[in-house]
Each structure stands twice: as structure tokens, then as C-alpha cells.
Amino acid sequence: MKTSFDVIVIGAGIMGASIAAALVESGLDVALMEKGIAGAQGATRDTGGIVRGLELDAALRPLTRRGSLYGNPGIVHALYESALNRSGVAYIASAEVCGQYLEAVDSEGCEGIELHASVDALDNGRFSPFCAGECLLIERKGGTVDARVTVSNLCRYVSEKATYLDHLAVDRCVELDGHVQVHAGKLCLEATWVVDACGASGPLPRPSNAVHARTIPFTRFGCDQAPSMPIVAHHLNTYLLPLGRNLVQVGGQRRQRAEHADQLNLAPLDNEQDVMDRVSRLGYDRHHSLPVVTQVGWDAYTEDGRPLIGRSSAKSHVFIATGFCGIGFKMAPNVAELLAFELGGLMSGVSMDAAYRSVMEAFRPSRFAEVVLS
Ligand SMILES: Cc1cc2nc3c(=O)[nH]c(=O)nc-3n(C[C@H](O)[C@H](O)[C@H](O)COP(=O)(O)OP(=O)(O)OC[C@H]3O[C@@H](n4cnc5c(N)ncnc54)[C@H](O)[C@@H]3O)c2cc1C
């Protein structure tokens, strides 16, 4: 069996699967390792799959922008597009928040953005009586991507052209001079570079106090008519995701945190009550809306709301790609493209230009305390 690679990616959630596929496409010799079933263990299992380019934090916009950063869309963008339901995404928000979103349009040139002074233009005005004073933004190019189909297609691409090992948990990594040993049970693989894409539950050390796990509860309820597109309801601090003609998923706000995902308390708390209270303020009255199920997912969070992408310390051969704070699904194609660019450059001795470094500065893991792996 082949045991030596250019890059080993650990974790086949949406991020690891996307990064591995982009690295394979760029010509590197890659192994992708997953402790369970791809996309079925961590945050990706429960993702809503909403993809949208508008983003309030300007530093995140290169990650959330729709389409390729460097002109060549590549396999990951292509697979996202093929699994995209182009419904559009609506934002219900105050004029002030809409103005902040529109800065993204100025700086990133997001196409297909419509601004409306009221919510009348959404679903024949059905939200108008409940959202007086709110504005409406519609991002026509946004929508939802089928996460299961996408992860599965990404892993198939990797397994056909490189190496994909599932049901194999990585126990630890040991950094030696210029390469890294990856231990998984009896197996010891090695690579010049390793990417830790293990979300909120990885086995590798990370900068101290950099990443924690946080629950993301959601409730699904049946109703007369689901909205025609996902709605980011700023004024209610939640989202509504149509799952069918009569089924809607809504994010709950009663959250818990822990150092690792396996220490989280996954009790639903009073999220169902909280969600039903919120959606009643959008006109889903209790007589015609039935809560069906409340689930508690989780993701990896950082204190500053920005992910960790880059070397775990200045000289380390381990890259970290985690801390996606509940919005990592939409970022995966661009994160994959950026890391394929950087790791491809490192393998061929090309250093990154100033523009690249300035984009990545905000995500440097060493903005938190550095780690020593071995
Ligand atoms: C309810 C919910 C709704 C969401 N909705 C959206 C949305 O609409 N849009 C959006 O952009 N984002 C959304 N998100 C956020 C998004 O889903 C996450 O940010 C994203 O899935 C993170 O992906 P990841 O690959 O980094 O982590 P994960 O999906 O957690 O993947 C990590 C992988 O690493 C593997 N792993 C861990 N340890 C090991 C080991 N020792 N060896 C090998 N493998 C290991 C795990 O098994 C797992 O498969 C949502 C999240 C939740 C929970």
C-alpha cells in the first residue's frame, strides 16, 4: 500500500473533502482520511447548505464570494454549482444592516442583488404585515447546495484520482524534519504537508484558546406554505430554510459551548419554544404550524468569528482549516482554492504574493498562541 504523499488531509467534512479535491486537481499526490463516513459526522451532517456571497465582515468576503477567486472555477466550484438550487436568498433587515451588506456589493461586485424598501416583494407580500419598517435584500445568485451529494461527489473524485480512506481515525501526528507522520491505529502514513480539517473534534493540538465547539440547534416545523427561498431574518436573529412545500427549518438560539465537540451537552433545551415564538412574529401562527423535530448540531467557533486557516505555527508542516463559526459550508470552495494555491506553491518552491498574504492575514492561526506539535 502507498504510504507516502505530498499532502494528507484529515477529516472529510465539507472542508476537508473540498480541500482534498482541489489539491488533487492541482496535481498533488493526496490522501484524505476520515474517521467515519464523509460528511456524516460533524457540522456538515446538519448543514442547511445555504450559500450566499453577502457578508458583513469584510475580511471574510474573499471566502464567501460566489465563484472562483483566481479565474479557473475548478472541480469544487463546479460540483457546488451542479448541486445548487438557485432559489435566491432573502435578507430581512433594517435599512442600516442592508446598507452594511451593500458595502459588500461595492467591494466585491456581487451580481444580482436587489434592494427593496419593504418586504412586499417577497412571496406576494405575505411577510409585509409582520415586518413593518424592515427592508429586503435578495441575492439572486444564492441558494442551497445539497451537502450530501456534494461531499459524496468530492470524495468520489478524490478516491478515483488519489487516495480516500474512511472509517479510519487519525490518533496523532509527529512532525519530523520537513515531513509529518500520521498515525491511525496500526497504520503510519507520511506526507510533506498535513491539513487538519477535523472541525470541532480533531485529535491534533491547536493554538490554545483558539477554537471551541458550540451547539447549533434547529427546529423543523410543518406549515401551510414554506417561503420560496431561504430567509436570513436579521430582525429575529435567525434563518428560515424551506425544506419542501410545507416544511421549514429554523435556527434556534439557545446554545452551549465546550472545548471539544464530544464534551458538548446536546440537550435541545427550550429551543423549540424559542423558535416557535420567533416564527410567530413572521406570521406562522400556532394553529397552522406544527413543530416536527428539534435537533442539535455543532460547529467549531473562534472568539473573533473568523476561521483558522494556515500553518499551525510558523515552521510547522501542519495546516489548520477549522473554526468556521456556523457558516463554513458556503466558504469551502474558496478555502479549498486558496489552500490548493498555497500548498501547490510550497511544493514547487513558489512563495505567495502580497495580495494573497493580505487576504489570509485575518485567518492566521498564530493570531492565537502558537502550538508545538512534537
Ligand atoms: C445546523 C447547522 C446548519 C448550518 N447551516 C449552514 C448554512 O446554511 N450555510 C453555511 O455556510 N454553513 C452552515 N453551517 C456551518 C457548516 O455546516 C460548517 O461550518 C461546516 O460544515 C464545517 O465543515 P468542516 O468540514 O470544517 O467540519 P465537519 O463537518 O465537522 O467535519 C470534520 C470531519 O473531521 C472528521 N474527523 C474528526 N476527527 C478525526 C480523526 N481523528 N480522524 C479522521 N477524521 C476525523 C469528522 O468525522 C468530520 O467528518 C451549519 C451548521 C449547522 C450545524
Image: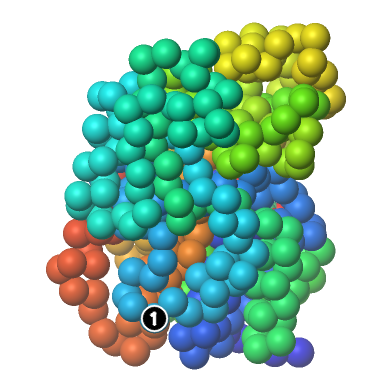
Image coords of residue 221 (percent x, y)? 77, 25
Image coords of residue 113 (percent x, y)? 35, 48
Image coords of residue 311 (percent x, y)? 38, 61
108 to 288, vertically: above or below: below
Whether residue 64 is visible: yes
Residue at 24%, 67% (x, y): give it: 356
Relative to 184, 319 lies left or right: left
116 to 309, vertically: above or below: above
The number of numbered discs placed on residues in the rendered structure image is 1
Amino acid residing under circle 1? Asn
Residue at 63%, 22% (x, y): give it: 252
Residue at 73%, 59% (x, y): give it: 148
Q: Residue furthest front?
A: 124
320 or 138: nearer the eye?
Answer: 138
- Residue where numbered disc 1 is placed: 72
216 or 247: nearer the eye?
Answer: 247
Q: Residue furthest left?
A: 354
